[in-house]
Image: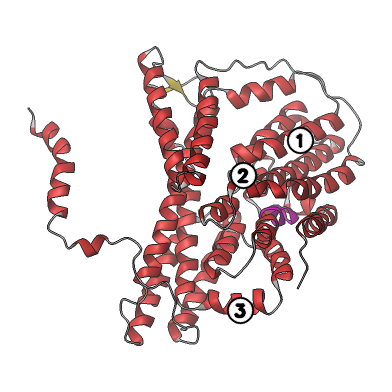
C-alpha cells in the first residue's frame, strides 16, 4: 500500500492515541460556575463593550464597505474573551469564566449542526428544482398583480415555518420578478416598480411573521426552543398574533397595489429525479427533531443530523443509479460528479460564522456582568411587557439574533406566555425596517435599486400598525399586561 494512501487512513487512530495522553479535564464539557462576576466597571469591561460596538457597526455597514459580517465578529469574539480572561485574573479567579465559555461553545455547536442540516436540505431541494418548479407554475398562470401580491404573501407566510424566512423570501421575490418579466421589464416602468416594491415588503413581513410561530421558521425561535423555554406545541399559540402582524399591513398595502395583469410566461420546470423524496425526507427530519426533543429529551440537533445522514444515503443512491454530473447555476456547465457534499459546501458559511461571533461576543459581555445589569434595568425596572416591545424595536435596528441571545443569556424569570411575547416581537420586529431581518437584507440584494431601505420605510407606518396589533392580540389571548 502506498504511504500517501496509508497516512489519511491512520489519522483518526493516531488522533485517538494522542488524545489518550491528555488529561480528561481538558475536554470537560460545560462543567463550571455559570454565574458571572460583576466586572462592568473595569477597564477590560469598557474595552469589551467598545470592541463589540465597533464590530457591530462594521456589520451594519456591510453592504457599503463590502466586508463580510462574519469577519469582524469572529475577531471581536477573540478579543473580548481575552479581555474576560484578563479581568478574571485581575480578581484572582483565572479560571472563573471557563464554565460560561464552555456553555457558549456548546450553544453554538448545537445551533451550527442544526442549521447545517437544514441548509443542506434546502440546497438539495433547490438543486433538484423543487423551488424552480413551484416558481414556474406560478409564473405560467397569468394571475393579476393583486392576486400575485396575495398569493406570494400567503405562500411566504406558510412556507417560512418550514423553510426559514430567508429562503422563503428569496423564493417568493424570484416569483414576483419573474412574473413581471424580469428586471429589464421593471426599469423605466413606475407601476411595475411600485408593484415589485410593495410585493417585496409584503413578502418580508409575511416571511418574518410566519417564522415566528414555528421553531424552524427563524433562528430566534429555534434558540428559544433549544433553550427549552417554550415547548414545540406551545409555539402555535403565536399563530393568530402572527397572522394579524402580516394581514394588517398586507390589507392596507393591497389597496394601493397597481391594477393590471402581466402576460403569462411559459417557464415550466420539471423537478429532477428524487426531488420529492428529498422533500419527504425533510419532513421526516423535522418530525425526528421534534420527537427527539419532546419525547426522548435529546437535543433537536441530533434529530436533524440523523435526517442529514438519511439524505446522504439517498444521495449515494442517486449517485450510483445515474446521477453522473451536476451543473452550476446556469444549468449548462458541469461542475463534477453529483455528490450530496456539494450541497453541504453551499451552506451559508458566512452566516454560520457570524453566529459564532455573535454568540461568543454576547457571552463574553455576559461573563463580565453586562447582561445581568441590563436584565435588571429592563425586565425588572420596566416590566416584561414593555421589555418585550423594546426587544422587537431593537431587532429592527440590530439583528434579532444577538438581541434574542442576549435575552436568553440574561435568563429573566418569565412565564411561557411572556417568553412567547419576546419570541413574537423579536421575530416580527425586524420587519419594521428593511435592514432589520435577514429576509429584508437579502431582498435588497435580489431587487437591488428597486426594493430599498427608503422604499420600505415609506410603508413602515403600516407595518408598525401590524406590530402593535399583534402584540395587543397576544396580550388578550395570553392574559398579559405591560407591567
Viewer-proximal residue among 351 and 362: 362
**Residue 435 inside the magenta-drawn segment:** no
- Quadrant position of the C terminus in the picture: bottom right
Dot 1 or dot 3: first in sequence order is 1
> Is 242 situated left or right of 30 in this image?
right
- Say above or below: 38 vs 235: below
Residue at horizontal 60 percent and vertical 59 percent from the top: 61
Viewer-proximal residue among 108 and 63: 108
Give SS at disc 3: helix
In magenta, the rendered stretch is 427-434
Labelled disc at residue 217: 2
Question: Which corner quadrant of the image does residue 254 belong to?
Answer: top right
**Residue 432 inside the magenta-drawn segment:** yes
> Is 263 situated left or right of 398 in this image?
right
Give the Cα distance between marks 3 and 2. Answer: 30 Å
Q: Is residue 321 visible?
A: yes
Residue at horizontal 74 percent and vertical 43 percent from the top: 206
Q: Are marks 1 and 2 in contact (CB under 8 Å)?
A: no
Q: Which residue is mark 1?
A: 154
Instruction: Label the magenta part by its dominant secondary structure.
Output: helix
Labelled disc at residue 376: 3
Viewer-proximal residue among 96 and 455: 96
Within 10 Å of disc 1 (Cα), the crowding (few <14, some 14-19, many 20+) is some
Amino acid at each position: 500500500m502506498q504511504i500517501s494512501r496509508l497516512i489519511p487512513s491512520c489519522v483518526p487512530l493516531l488522533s485517538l492515541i494522542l488524545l489518550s495522553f491528555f488529561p480528561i479535564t481538558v475536554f470537560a464539557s460545560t462543567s463550571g460556575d455559570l454565574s458571572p462576576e460583576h466586572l462592568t466597571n473595569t477597564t477590560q469591561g469598557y474595552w469589551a463593550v467598545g470592541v463589540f460596538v465597533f464590530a457591530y457597526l462594521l456589520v451594519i455597514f456591510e453592504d457599503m464597505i463590502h466586508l463580510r459580517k462574519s469577519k469582524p465578529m469572529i475577531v471581536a469574539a477573540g478579543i473580548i474573551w481575552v479581555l474576560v480572561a484578563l479581568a478574571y485574573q485581575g480578581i484572582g479567579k483565572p479560571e472563573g469564566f471557563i464554565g460560561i465559555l464552555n456553555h457558549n461553545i456548546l450553544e453554538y455547536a448545537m445551533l451550527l449542526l442544526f442549521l447545517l442540516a437544514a441548509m443542506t436540505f434546502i440546497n438539495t431541494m433547490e438543486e433538484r428544482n423543487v423551488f424552480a418548479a413551484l416558481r414556474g407554475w406560478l409564473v405560467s398562470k397569468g394571475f393579476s398583480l393583486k392576486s400575485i401580491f396575495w398569493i406570494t404573501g400567503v405562500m411566504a407566510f406558510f412556507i417560512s415555518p418550514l423553510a426559514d424566512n430567508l429562503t422563503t423570501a428569496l423564493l417568493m421575490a424570484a416569483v414576483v420578478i419573474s412574473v413581471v418579466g424580469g428586471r429589464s421589464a421593471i426599469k423605466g416602468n413606475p407601476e411595475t416598480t411600485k408593484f415589485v416594491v410593495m410585493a417585496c415588503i409584503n413578502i418580508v413581513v409575511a416571511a418574518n411573521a410566519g417564522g415566528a410561530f414555528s421553531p424552524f421558521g427563524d433562528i430566534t425561535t429555534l434558540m428559544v426552543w433549544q433553550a427549552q423555554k417554550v415547548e414545540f406545541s406551545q409555539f402555535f399559540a403565536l399563530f393568530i398574533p402572527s397572522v394579524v402582524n402580516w394581514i394588517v399591513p398586507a390589507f392596507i398595502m393591497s389597496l394601493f397595489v397597481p391594477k393590471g395583469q402581466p402576460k403569462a410566461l411559459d417557464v415550466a420546470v420539471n423537478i429532477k429525479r428524487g426531488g420529492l423524496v428529498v422533500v419527504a425526507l425533510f419532513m421526516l427530519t423535522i418530525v425526528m427533531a421534534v420527537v427527539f426533543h419532546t419525547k426522548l429529551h435529546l437535543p433537536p440537533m441530533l434529530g436533524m443530523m440523523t435526517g442529514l445522514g438519511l439524505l446522504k444515503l439517498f444521495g449515494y443512491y442517486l449517485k450510483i443509479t445515474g446521477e453522473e454530473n451536476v451543473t452550476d447555476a446556469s444549468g449548462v456547465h458541469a461542475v463534477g460528479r453529483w455528490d450530496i457534499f456539494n450541497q453541504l459546501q453551499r451552506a451559508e458559511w458566512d452566516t454560520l460564522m457570524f453566529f459564532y461571533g455573535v454568540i461568543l461576543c454576547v457571552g463574553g459581555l455576559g461573563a463580565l456582568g453586562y447582561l445581568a445589569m441590563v436584565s435588571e434595568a429592563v425586565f425588572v425596572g420596566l416590566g416584561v411587557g414593555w421589555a418585550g416591545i423594546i426587544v422587537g424595536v431593537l431587532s429592527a435596528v440590530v439583528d434579532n439574533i444577538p438581541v434574542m441571545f442576549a435575552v436568553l443569556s440574561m435568563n429573566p424569570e418569565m412565564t411561557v406566555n411572556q417568553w412567547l411575547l419576546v419570541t413574537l416581537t423579536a421575530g416580527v420586529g425586524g420587519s419594521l425596517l428593511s435592514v432589520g431581518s435577514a429576509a429584508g437584507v437579502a431582498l435588497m440584494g435580489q431587487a437591488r435599486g428597486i426594493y430599498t431601505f427608503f422604499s420600505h420605510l415609506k410603508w413602515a407606518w403600516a407595518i408598525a400598525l401590524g406590530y402593535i396589533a399583534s402584540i395587543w392580540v397576544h396580550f388578550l389571548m395570553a392574559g398579559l399586561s405591560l407591567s
